[in-house]
Amino acid sequence: MAVRSFIDTNVLVYAQASDVPGKQRAALDLLKELYEQGLGVLSTQVLQEYCNVALKKLKLSERDVRLQLDLYEQFEVVQVTPTIIRAALDLHQTRSVSFFDAMVLASAHTSGCNVLWTEDMNSGEVVHGVLISNPF
């Protein structure tokens, strides 16, 4: 792989989702590879969304969510800034993507990532130099 890669929330969620073992294995393999190569990037938005889903849908305990955060913060974490929010508003308007997806794309672009790993957008599409790729 060897390219700077942005990780969307669904990858983190599937890493914990034992009810979908194929997707769980793919997510865990991707996270391991990106961690070992030092190429994985997350954003504060992704971490917030992960915590929400982990608590509400996956029913993880607060302790387990904190332990996962300890792992995930070993990746580079991009702070969502007003500049990223403005870029997301532009993408939302010009690319017809949801605002939250636009925030992920803007964070990936701003942080210099070449690939965005997500299940939520059009795999194969390139937006501002970022290739959207579905790891599942």
Image (spheres, grey):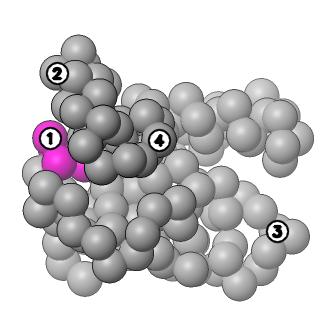
Q: Residue at x 17, y 48 (%)?
A: 109
Residue 25 percent across, percent down from the top left: 64, 80
Stretch of the chain drawn in magenta: 107-111
* Front of the two marks 1 and 3: 1
Residue at the disc numbered 2 = 83
Give the Cα separation between the discs numbered 1 and 3. 33 Å
Q: Is residue 11 left or right of residue 105?
A: right
Q: Could one spot residue 76 in this view of the protein?
A: no
Amino acid identity at mark 2: Thr
Of badges 4 and 3, nearer the viewer stands 4
What residue is disc 3 on? 18
Q: Which mark sits nearer the N-terminus, 4 or 2?
A: 2
The main secondary structure of the magenta stretch is helix
Q: Which mark is residue 80?
A: none
Three-letter code, disc 3 = Ser
Is there a contact, CB below 8 Å, between mark 1 and mark 2? yes
Mark 3 falls on what kind of element? loop
The residue indicated by pointer 4 is: 98
Please name the residue that numbered disc 1 is placed on.
110
Amino acid at pointer 1: Thr
